[in-house]
Amino acid sequence: MKEELERLIDSVDYNIHLFIKRAKAEDFIFAKQLDEVVSSASLIKVPILIAVLELIERQNISLQMEVEIKQNHKVEYSVLTEQDSDKSTLYELLVWMIITSDNTATNVLIDFLGMEECNAFFKKIGLTRTKLQRKMMDFDSLQKGVDNVTTARDMANLFTRIYKQDLLPLQFSQLALDILSRQRINDGLKRYIIENVKIAHKTGNLDTVSHDVGIVFHEKLDYIIGIMITDINDAEEAKKCIGLISKIVFQYFERIERGEHFL
């Protein structure tokens, strides 16, 4: 597997930040550029999901509590904006934020929790280089160099803890996994996998980045994979690359299942 991955990484012009690990293990099977800070794109929505659920549990807030959607929350490419919704439950906001990467829902939740509170929570759970610094679709800030950022290592730590269910009480840990498993954007990690495999994951895409990070619930051995690509000039080619890497890794774990342990 390692040789295949190295050949593929060497064959492309963009930068690939990558990790593969068994879900129950701490060490990496394979890793590249774990600590370089990159634009998170919509990957930032995963720690936001956990931060909001932690607040809901801590303050005993109902998931069915309705929150106002203000005009300044609304952006394009949002099912909430399409419906011209003026309010939504916290549960609906969390689900839409993840499964369709809804940016209006995300902006509402950022205001609900507060940007400073989000960042304080990120640090509290060990995401040392993940920062929320702008709302979704705020391209003015982006042009000024203000962006949401993370690292592959932070994402590995986050998804490992989501898998272990040690960030939140059991009910909310299971809810987070359930929402991530309902992801509707499947043109990366699942792109070339024919098997009906469950993956709890989140994508993130901007003009120059394409990411997909998730937990693969394999029949015999669950694993966590993160593929974060930067400096791209062709988003579709980057997603194909994510798909190819994911297929190589999936086939590696298939071989482990058959008793073949070679990397």
Image: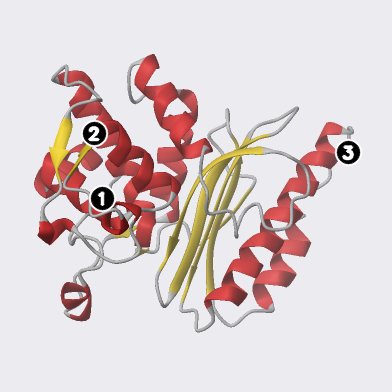
| CA distance separating discs 3 and 1 | 43 Å
Please give left or right for residue 227 compared with residue 11 in the image: left
For residue 89, which numbered disc appears in the image? 2
Q: Nearer the viewer, residue 44 or 183?
A: 183
Q: Nearer the viewer, residue 98 or 233?
A: 98
Q: Nearer the viewer, mark 3 or mark 1?
A: 1
Q: Amino acid at mark 3?
A: Glu
What residue sits right under mark 3 in the picture?
A: 260
Quadrant in which residue 165 is drawn: top left
Tell me if label 3 and label 1 are in contact, CB under 8 Å: no
Q: Amino acid at mark 2?
A: Thr
Please give left or right for residue 124 compared with residue 231 in the image: left
| Label 2 vs 1, first from the N-terminus | 2
Please identify the residue farthest to the front as the structure is shown: 83
Helix, strand or loop for disc 2: strand
| CA distance separating discs 2 and 1 | 13 Å
| Label 3 vs 1, first from the N-terminus | 1
What residue sits right under mark 1 in the picture?
A: 106
- Asked if residue 80 is positioned above or below residue 222 in the image, the reply reads below
| CA distance separating discs 3 and 2 | 48 Å
